Amino acid sequence: MIKKMMVTFKLNGKSTDVVVEPRELLIHTLREKCLHTGPHIGCDSSHCGACTVDVDGMSVKSCTMLTVQADGSELLTIEGFAQGGELHALQEGFMQEHGLQCGFCTPGMITRAYRLLKENPDPTEAEIRYWMAGNLCRCTGYQNIVKAVQYAARKLRGEPVQTSYPLMETTTH
Amino acid sequence: MIPRPFEYHAPTTVPAAIALLDQYGDEAKLLAGGHSMLPMMKLRFAEPAHLIDLRKIAALKGIREVGNEIRIGAMTTENELIWSPLLQQKCPLLVEGAGLISDPQVRYMGTLGGDISHADPANDHPALMIALGASFVLTSAAGERVVSADGYFLGLYYTLLEAGEIMTEIRIPIPAAGSGSCYAKLKRKTGDYATAAAAVLLRMQGGVVAEVAITLTNLGETALKANDAENYLRGKPLDDATIREAARLAMAICEPAADLRGDIEYKTAMAGEMTQRALRTALSRCSA
Amino acid sequence: MDATIDSKAVPSNEERLAKLEGMGCSRKRYEDPRFIQGKGNYVDDIKMPNMLVGVMVRSPYAHARIKSIDTSKALAHPGVYAVLTADDLKPLKLHWMPTLAGDVQAVLADGKVVFQNQEVAFVVAEDRYIAADAAELVEVEYEPLAVLVDPLKAMAPDAPTVRDDIKDKDVGAHGARKHPNHIFTWDIGDKDKTDRAFDNAEVTVKQDMIYQRVHPCPLETCGCVASFDKIRGDLLVYITSQAPHVVRTVVGMLSSIPESKIRIISPDIGGGFGNKVGIYPGYVCAIVAAIVLGRPVKWIESRTENLTTTAFARDYHMTGELAADKDGKIKALRVHVTADHGAFDACADPSKWPAGMFHVVTGSYDIPNAFVSVDGIYTNKCPGGVSYRCSFRVTEAVYLIERMVDVLAQKLGIDKAEIRFRNFLRKDQFPYQTALGLEYDSGDYEPALRKGLAALDYPALRAEQAARRADPDAATLMGIGICTFTEIVGAGPSKMCDILGIGMFDSCEIRVHPDGSAIARMGTISQGQGHQTTYAQIIASVAGIPASLITVEEGDTATAPYGLGTYGSRSTPVAGAAIARASHKIREKARKIAAHLLEVSPDDVEFDLDRFVVKGAPDQAKSIKEVAWAAYNNVPEGMEMGLEAVDYYDPPNFTFPFGTYICVVDVDRYSGETKIRRFYALDDCGTRINPMIIEGQIHGGLTEGFAVAMGQQLTYDDAGNVLGGTLMDYFLPTSMETPHWETDFTVTPSPHHPIGAKGVAESPHVGSIPCFTAAMVDAFAHLGVTHMNMPHNSFRVWQQSHALNLDQR
């Protein structure tokens, strides 16, 4: 019988203790023990990125990390984005630019985009596409996800933002 | 997709890791970035009783210039390679190669030493290391030994690494000023292994090839060094005819396995195509 | 803030329209706040007290006799509660279950396995870790049998028999069977007339093509949580189903529990695309285990299980023939299909049509004679045959006709746009009866194609291509693909379409509260389409209630009216009509109440956006909010209190969206790599409800079309092993591979739909796939190539280039 281990990490700023088997995957701990069900399981094989969480400043596929490896780490999940009832610029961007449909990839997308914008506050479309390529989406075709990230980048840089989809169409085709 | 139970160890020093390795022998596996090992464990293809995680060993991190070589800690991640100003300036081939590995998240975790040590012929670093003339520091209780990348890879998942040894450092001679390089990788999509890839490190002098290294990924049981192609090119100008012939010679050493990426004929043809692409691009990047 | 309008100070029409956020408004989505904050509620997020986890033990063989199953070691493993096999299900008569196509399917393998990864045993344990350990301890002894993989060899006299259980039945659910591996032959059209047209034709062309086996692969796999209250006798199942009411009916049939005691809830669904229409063995096992153990049981697929065991799509081996005159005017179409249905016929089609709506295969063209014959075949592969982002078999049909029109153009040397102009149905021909018995509602094809050709400067593209073809040193080939498709969606009229005998109507219930806000419930279920947003827009426009005050609920059979669910682009054409009609009923009752309040005759009151006004006296008005309040305290004598409406809409016909797609591709001769340089998509989905959501749907459909055309395939080796059952090999494009999309539209409303809407989500998938192939073939067309089978991955494209010696420098 393998002994369980006590693991302590900061989850969205809150100190958290869990007791796990060494083989337990971080995604399962987050979802089933910490009840943070925002990160999702899409592929089991570190291809889809739906389980992306931020660990010590890195975007990590939490299906391919052991919980014991997160001991002492700072974790950020989608649940930690909105502060004081205020949406994060990325959350606003995804909504305003229609960067999501079924929503299953969205927590991973936003979490990944967060780290991207920390590293590169003014990415080109090509850079966004390259650095977001670890997250699969089956619904949007990525075009509006790119726009959502650009929207958030502008907002985080303090520039004015505007949806690409005004409520009423002003021009006709 | 659940691993078998195992005991987990997270040593913080190399000697401690080696002690664990010696203690548990065959029952132990080293964990670097984990993106090859953990998937194999989840599929229960790998079933270590003891997992020794190297991520907490600070001494295995870092990129530094020592004399005329660059020394990289084995646990340095792909993204750290990509973002290294030193490598961007003095060893762009490694930066280009790392940027074509898997996807952004995997590159935060995946390490240079892990990629090399796994010795999967589909991994990119083995060919890059051979092209760069790198050597590896292997550390055990008995001390360190330094081995050349060329000759290190013996077969599928099989290298010169002995029981009780850990790869601790990668040493890359700084390519001569004016060299050009390219890693040309054909893959189906982001996150995939190469259908075929070629690494080229090239130095021209007086309009002819002074030095050239050509290596190939995923075209045999190990990364391949295209010695005949290199020998052929030395002293010759790089033009359509010589590039074609070099590609032909590179193709001749390929023994790829057929899979969904393509059959043997296609992969061999792509070995030639990537060799040509890498040679042409490397030439365009030569400044002498 | 008061979101309704007070009748005393009436703002401008624009302000009122903006407040309503009705049809035509790019209203931001009601669903988004929960999804962007990680508060979606998908099935794997559901955690019930005392919940257990079930996992499947699956067959490594594609065809084998089961000699024995030993569950003792697994049962002895600590934390294991049950291991179910077919023998355990037999006393309950649940070891087999009916399929939607009139066949039966083994829930757990009964005596033999007939496809790789087939369900053999179901292990229930305390958690997923214990369940995974225990599943390894189930010992199954197999005796491998000869495997049938190729459907074209299935009816050979010596072919292995896939289905022992029905091998002697010479009549199946769809008529006579010619061979133990034959499921049905389905013919439609006038064979003799068509044959005569071919005999007399100036020109004929014939082309074989394979529409490969693919999988819808939503990002969320399938799963459920079943729970049974032994005291009340209530069964509750959370399930990722696109058709929760149908699930309830099927579960009722299987379990003999009355439907009133069964509650099915489809929570948030992480994409469906047809994958989540069927009933899978895991659902049945979880329900049985929950009933037997008296504890909730969760079953969630892994990705490999999803790709290899739940409903595939396509796998049509088609031969098309066209007869025409030498000007390219088409006289007749003849089609034969060998349809590989796998080991059980679990196709999701309306009961009467075993090849779905494949008979839309005459496309956008005036084709006077047509005949189609489809043979369904069993093989040792996963069952399925679902509609992956299309109505039933429509993508196969559109692929065939669009390919054939190109083949004909090539044979005659006519431009591929020009041949379409020569054969298009004209606007004045609608409603149009096709040779295969469908009635197209409306269409206006020529302006759409003209708009597309102008948008891309088609003559310039052809000139560039001619120059490229003339240059022997050009490293890339250039292809231009055109697709002018007609879809058929909105299943459908109950006289033609039913599932298990239930007509394919859909439903809506609206209840307006005293404060003027409302709740609406539908029989459909969104999987990302944004129903909660767009349905409210329909109500807003028809009944005058601001969309922001409308709560839309779907997916819970305890509260929603019976509906057939969401697939085949049927939500807007069918449920959308029910919503419009229910909204209209609300409005009509409200008008009578308003007349009563205004003390005039109802005939003197008219509806004005969000209020009711006395004709000729616009200052005499009552807002919908005022009427709602009055509905609960002051209604005309003889009228029931309240403001509610229900509508069950049985559509008179399908709707027929259409579009013009144009693709420009550059192909590397030496490597087979492709680059989609431009992709233009003009869609006509009739009345547009939310332009933002429409564009999102089109982007997504195009991307899934790109995936199918350029990379997706479920590949089987000769032993029936599925190759590449992970996302490493099964092609889901990332942001790097996905092209940039250009969208455009025209509007041709459906004349029979209450708001003229036709449905849009599947057009981009259906229309883009043949467009990609057309572009790929066009790149090689000057060298005599008439067709290339999908997927157009580098390897296969290189094979074409290599065969033509184009890869030699």
Image: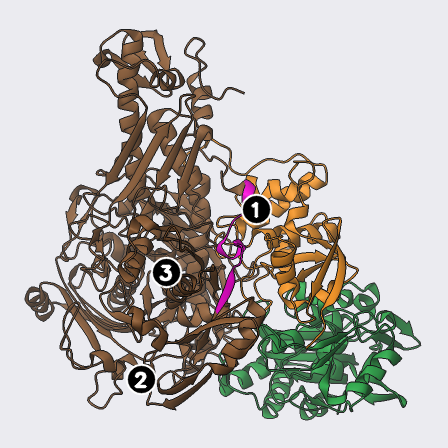
Chain colours: A orange, B green, C brown
Q: In this view, does C60 lie to the left or right of C366?
A: right
Q: What element carries label 1?
A: loop
Q: Does the magenta stretch include residue A143?
A: no
**Both labels 3 and 1 in a single chain:** yes
Q: How many labels does the image show?
A: 3
Q: How crowded is mark 1: few (under 14 residues within 10 Å), some or many (20 or more)?
A: some
**Both labels 1 and 2 in a single chain:** yes
Q: What element carries label 2?
A: loop
The three-letter code of the residue at mark 2 reads Leu
Residue C364 position in % (x across, y down):
24, 53
Question: Please, which chain is the residue tagged with disc 3 on?
Answer: C
Q: What element carries label 3?
A: loop
Could you tell me which residue is drawn at 27 percent across and 87 percent down? C160
Disc nearest the viewer among 3 and 1: 1
Q: Residues within 10 Å of mark 2 (few under 14, many from 20)?
A: many
Q: Which of C166 and C327 is in front in this view?
A: C166
Question: Please, which chain is the residue tagged with disc 1 on?
Answer: C
Question: Please, which chain is the residue tagged with disc 2 on?
Answer: C
The three-letter code of the residue at mark 1 reads Lys
Q: Disc 2 versus disc 3: distance between alpha carbons?
A: 25 Å
Rendered image quadrant of residue B128: bottom right
Tell me if residue B1 can be seen.
no
Disc nearest the viewer among 2 and 3: 2
Q: Is residue B44 left or right of residue C578?
A: right
* Residue at numbered disc 1: C39
Disc marking residue C148: 2
Which residues make up the magenta segment?
C33-54
Q: Nearer the viewer, residue C713 or A164?
A: C713
